[in-house]
Amino acid sequence: MSDVVEKTLSALPSLLSLDSQAGAGKLSPSSKLGNLIKGITELTSKHEEEKLIKKELAAIKEQVASPNTSMRQMKEIMVRAIYCEMLGYQASFSYIHAIKLAQQGSVLEKRVGYLAVSLFLNETDEFLLLLVNTVLKDLQSTNLIDVCMALTVVSQVFPRDMIPAILPVVEEKLTHPKEIIRRKAVLALYKFYLIAPNQVQHIHSKFRKALCDKDPGVMAASLHIYLQLIKESPESYKDLTVSMVTILGQVVGGKLPMDFNYHSIPAPWLQIQLLRILAYLGKEDQGTSELMYDVLEDSLRRAEMNHNMTYAILFECVKTIFTVHPKAQLLEKAAECIGNFVLSPKINLKYLGLKALTYVVQQDANLALPHQMTIIECLDHSDIIIKRETLELLFRITNAQNVTVIVEKMLEFLRMTSDDYSTIDLVGKTMNSVFSLGGDVMQPDIPNNFLRLLADGVDSVEDRRMRLFAVDSYVSLLQGETAQLPQRFLQVISWVLGEYSHLREEQDSGTIMRLLARLLDQRNTSTETRSWVLGAMTKLCSNPVSVALARDVCERYSGSLNTVLRQRAQELMILSQDTELRARVLPAEGRLEHLEVDSSLSFLDGYVSEALAAGAAPYKSPHQRQEDLAQEKALTLEPYGLSLPVSLSSCSVTDRLTDGLSPTLLSMSSGLSGNGTELSHGGGSTTLKLDGVKRVWGKEGYLAQQQSVEDAPTPPVQLPSPLLSPQRPPSQTQTPEPDQEKQQLASSLFVGLGSHNSVCLMGRAEPAPQHFRRKPRGGSSGASERSSDSSHSSRSAAVDNLLLSNLLDSTTVASEGGATTTTPQQTSQRTLDHTTSNGSPHVEGKEEGVAAGGSLSLIRGMVAVVLPTHTETDPQSDLHPAPHPAPALERPGDLPLTSHLPAELSGLARSELTPLCSDQDPSLALSACRVYKEDALVVLVFIVNNTNSTLHQMALQLTCKELEISCISGSPLKEVKGHSVSVCLHTVVMKRASVQVELAGLLSYQRPLGQPQAAQFSLSLSLKHFIRPLTVSTGEYGKMWLSFSHDLKQNLRLVTTEHQEPLTATLDALKSKLHLHIVDIIGSEGIVACRLLQGEGHGQPCLLHCRVHANTLAVWLRSPVPELPDSLLYHCQKALTET
Amino acid sequence: MIKAILIFNNHGKPRLIRFYEYFAEDLQQQIIRETFHLVSKRDDNVCNFLEGGSLIGGSDYKLIYRHYATLYFVFCVDSSESELGILDLIQVFVETLDKCFENVCELDLIFHMDKVHFILQEVVMGGMVLETNMNEIVGQVELQNRMEKSEGGFSAAPARAVSAVKNMNLPEMPRNINIGDINIKVPSLSPF
């Protein structure tokens, strides 16, 4: 405690005792309150306080009971009792005395009595009945103060049933000569209306009279009532619009007495009230709205002083303008006003600005566009409330295109503040809408992160509440129409219900089981989702009803063609029958034990080498098999490439060759992988094949969850950060300005808001590093994400594990199950697995063991069989339309149109002009040209007007769902004069890699005196237009190679020329056709890198490793993007065939 | 409508509690604690609005507060109230207190809890804003005070006590904090 305070405190007693001496002899009541307060002040613990207050209460009790206590003393005692109650200590014995004081005391004592009553009692208290007569008497008193007190207490606390008893008297007060009485009477009646609406229905006419009262104060009070009434039924009060408008006009016009001014603003609270009323009246009613436009404009104009209160009026005004029937001119002004709010340095105004924006974007999402940067800044605001409001705003503008980024932001916010009530609310509704809106376009890590968030954390109340919220909302969702919900959302729902529906006490698991079973029956539910659902059912089947249901489901799905479903159904079957086993496998607690996944499958090495030694054919990847089939060659048993470019960073390729070490060895954890086999190709081949093994059942979807486990480390999110730098062209390797990053964020957040000009507002999209939404996360967080991915599968892993041992133990179960999994290989695999996992029997390792074992057994039988379900694009069988003429790097003698190229693009490589749809209208010629910019492809559309007349209302729209298109032409195209040319520029980048895309264009225009016309055209763009060289060093290449997961291998034709090595010639051909960057050529191997323009400015790398081998070029592509290698390979192939 | 008005000091000790909707006793105390928890961890340079806590009404409710030296004035309102309007209403209320108590400080609120209640009754009635004109409010209160003076009363004594404390020449005693034209002094009775 500070000195000051201590001195103050030590001074207090003397002062107080001085007082009590002045109080002459007898105990001064004041000192008692003083003593009480002083006593409390000196206390140090809550416990002592309690003791002291108890003592005090006992003393009060004694005093109030004493017949000698005067009313005056009673008044003082009441204040002490109020004080104790305020601190949270019940003084119920004093309630009756408070009433007595109100009944019997003089005016001042009565006042304290009433106060105590209104603080102590509530409407339902029976004590209040004792007060009715007193109130009635006071209402009829001639003393103003008595009446005021009675009205006050009536509006604070009064028994509903007793309202009729005093209603006539209160009504009477509406005509009282004193305005303060009339005003209080109005409010008291309003209170009656709120608690018992039917009892005051007959006095509506009196309310009208109050509205027209000559005293503005009474009128203002009556607005409380009208606000409520009009809110409830605006239709019945439309006739009041004119009066309200007149009143507001007078207030704004300064017709009120000066007394009503607040900081020289005329009656601001009154204005606010009126504006709100007008909003209710004018909502969706053009006629009524038109009556108020003038006054709205007036108050918008007059409110210009720089005071809080004017902003309050402005805010209300803006809200009203956006609520009533729109008027363009007003909307414009209001939008400007919102801008001022948002940009204000005053944080309260900023908050209101965001709130206003949140409100108005529901009508016109474009309104948020001018404030993009401010909104982005607010996202990082130090005030959590501002942040939350911003997210709320983002939530409103969520669309399919920006959903990913917004959800990332939400999750980020959540991670910071998971203990807040408001977040639960926000998150719940956001995630639900987000999933149903964008479910299938989301990257898989978003639902995973969300589930992790749910599952994470200690079992605090908030966590429970949030989980319960999720369960509740999902159950109600499932009870509705579910056919439209995205698959991913359904998966999330199943998981949440499986894990947490036990939180919902009133819901028996049977209901949820039934809901889930309904999902299974739906035709459009995907197999992956079905297996999630079955997983959830396994967790739920606890009571007899669900077991019966489970049995039903099992019967249906244990015959499924899909092995995953079959396995899940099997698990469900066994677990639903054996409760003990179920309790062991799926304990209610400890659902989140941390599991690690050995995705390299190193524990299989022993098995593989054994199999190979026994004469099994080495594993071949699907691509290789396909290729072999396609070429109808004999099986190439030689495994592909032990000379991998992995180690290029440290030593030369040839060195590596002689080393004979596996490149993937670096990432392997098992010691076995390096030395397990005696085969000619050493460890490298073994691990390579393992790589392939993993892929097989990954791609083919043997186990959906397990695939997700595997995929988890692969999305670019978890790329190690060093890889980011080589991706950027060297010119941009300097650290990007935070501004750039923000702009980047802005453009991804606001995409899809403006029809096609969203990015224009931002200016040119700067090439920024790709990591704004892929923040390099630390290793630990990466790992934890992975564990969240596996939180679903980890449990199934446990199931697998226990199930399997069960199966092994009792052959009866196994045979009865007709299981899919018990093959001899597998059994051996299992035992093998136990011995090879380095003595640390990770559960998940076993899981993979089971699965891989299954797939291995498959592979043995079908070395080179291409599965019919294989969906990957086969580049050779792809029947794509002939691509566009190759981009000519030399510039042919173009039409003079090229002179219309903007200066900044003139120096860049570009394609020839392609005529577009000239046949539709001979007077209008369209042609297109591509310019290859470093960070984007620019598509130029030349519009040539061959007539004398001017074309009006020109609008050009380009659409393509695979591309991100943004207009960059400086001046918006409106008209094209006769015999002139206009150019539209659009930057185009790919959303996801695809071999070829069709860009659809629509040009609408109008000739003078003509009908609006439209010309349609299409323009095909191929992947190679979006490929740019990626300049990296050999070392960087090596690092990147290791971190990329999507790969593809294929043999390509070698180009032979006279004066060049075949390898060099081939690579040169590729380089010139596809704009690749040749990183290095060492001997018979070459490494090449490129990037695909994707998203805003940044690219997705793709690495090629080429090796000359038996007159073919063996190419191995790797990229973090799944589709890229495929599509690029197609173009490589094409490029080489053409040469 | 205004749901509740809470005044507590920097340590969360309630100084004035007024609920305009029924809440059980223990719930009231919980609300005070929760509100204090929410409000006290906020800096002075952030906005004065908070989305409601979990106890008092949920998302439809807002907490609008001002922090003057040692005291927090928190108004809990529903969506029918204007944020900035309430913010200035708090200012009006505090200015009125200042006028009635002549340089109001925390001690005034402690010793004259009843008086503060009476002033508040003239500003807000049953949850509705009754009067926003400071002179009117002061006029009403003075009307009542005149009667009090004539009766003479207990509160005269502590008033003297407080003014004596106020006038003591302690080193940093009048740590006036200028908020608009309002000074609330800080002879804090700290942690109790």
Image (cartoon, coloured by chain):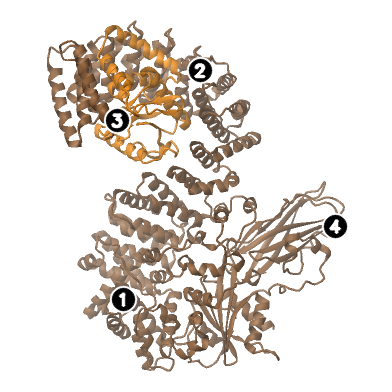
Residue A216 pos. (x, y %): 50, 15
Q: Which chain carries label 1?
A: A
Q: Which quadrant, please, contains the N terminus of chain A?
A: top left
Q: Which chain carries label 4?
A: A
Q: Residue at x 19, y 25 (%)?
A: A92
Mark 2, secondary structure of its residue? helix
Task: Point out which mark residue A260 bears.
Answer: 2
User: A789 or A233: nearer the eye?
Assistant: A789
Mark 4 or mark 1: which comes first in sequence? 1
Q: Which residue is drawn at 71% across and 74% down?
A: A886
Q: In this view, does A626 lie above or below A708?
A: below
Residue A973 pos. (x, y %): 74, 51
Mark 3 or mark 2: which comes first in sequence? 3
User: What whole-number distance in Å separates the C-alpha atoms at marks 3 and 1?
Assistant: 70 Å
Classed neighbour count for the residue bearing mark 2: other residues with Cα under 10 Å, few (<14), some (14–19), many (≥20): many
Q: Which chain is in orange here?
A: B
Residue at mark 4: A946
Residue at mark 1: A846
Mark 3 or mark 1: which comes first in sequence? 3
Q: Which of marks 3 and 4 is in front?
A: 3
Q: Which of marks 4 and 1 is in front?
A: 1
Amino acid at the residue labelled 1: Lys
Q: Residue at x 34, y 27 (%)?
A: B173
Mark 3, secondary structure of its residue? helix
User: What whole-number distance in Å separates the C-alpha atoms at marks 4 and 1?
Assistant: 73 Å
Residue at mark 3: A4
Q: Which quadrant, please, contains the C terminus of chain A?
A: bottom right
Instruction: Using the rendered image, report if marks 1 and 2 lie on a common chain.
Output: yes
Q: State yes or no: discs 3 and 4 in contact (Cβ < 8 Å).
A: no
Mark 4 or mark 2: which comes first in sequence? 2
